[in-house]
Image (cartoon, helix red, strand yellow):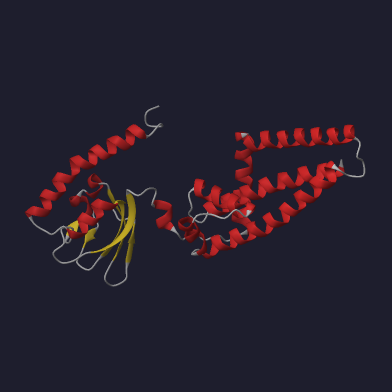
Amino acid sequence: MIAIATLLVVVTLTLIVNRVGTIALSSTGLSIEVAHFQARSALTGVGFTTSESELIVGHPARRRIVETLMLVGNAGFVTIVGTLVVGLAGASTDNATIALRIGTLGVGLLVILLFARSKTVDRYLTRWITSSLRRFTDLEVSDYIQLLDLSANYSVVELEVDADSWIAEHRLADMHLPDEGVLVLGVRRDDGTFVGAPRGHTMIREDDTLVLYGYADVILELAKRKVGVEGDLAHETLVPEIDERHDEEDAADPISNS
């Protein structure tokens, strides 16, 4: 029975390590769904898709996390196989003893599964892991584009302002960019000064570089939009279309409809 108990402890620790890996990866900017998949893939050694692997290997902190998970996963797999063989066979070949061990193992795994699926346990475990990671590690959340690029419809873009641009020499409040589904996250001046989270009175000048977040196609059109009547008309035409997009997104949001 010692081998069975050891096996159950190893399985429990493996689930905890998987949760630690998930939270650690999400702390670097990955969505919780992608982080969970990548942590489980690394821990089990099954690998992951090419497009998502680029998110890992190109980010030093994520790469270290995945390497650690791979090492722990390999050691855990060997331990599980070894203890499983010893636990089921052991020194006795009596059918009743083997059946008892299988039953004990099954019940133990079921209990672990129930705890793993418990939202209460998950909530407290997540808080403890998050607190420990913040205290004992230094994970840099530097991949903000991946964090904000929630779907193919949205992107983060740096836009250089030309002299004849529609947005040049205007205050943010006067352009009503949020009505087009575009937010200005920051303004980098020509002299290197950076204005973070600019407000409505912030003036946009020639040679400024804007950090924009919003609909990718709208930002692309905004980059080409020139000053004058045609630019004003493009803005007025887009606003109703963006309102329709927002209505569709609100309709798809279960929280908004509850």
Nearer to me, 246 or 96: 96
Residue 64 visible from this viewpoint: yes
Identified at 28% across, 35% down, the residue is 247
Residue 186 visible from this viewpoint: no
Nearer to me, 205 or 90: 90
Identified at 52% across, 63% down, the residue is 57
What count of labels does the image hold?
0
Classify the position of the C terminus by image quarter.
top left
Identified at 39% across, 48% down, the residue is 150
Extreme-bottom residue of the structure:
191
Nearer to me, 179 or 216: 216
Identified at 40% across, 52% down, the residue is 148
Give percent across and percent down for residue 78: 75, 54
Give percent across and percent down for residue 87: 84, 43
Classify the position of the N terminus by image quarter.
top right
Give percent across and percent down for residue 137: 61, 59
Residue 233 is left or right of residue 4, and the answer is left
Residue 230 is left or right of residue 122, and the answer is left
Q: Quadrant of residue 8?
A: top right
Give percent across and percent down for residue 183: 29, 51
Extreme-top residue of the structure:
258
Residue 147 is left or right of residue 196, and the answer is right
Q: Quadrant of residue 70?
A: bottom right
Residue 136 is left or right of residue 90, and the answer is left
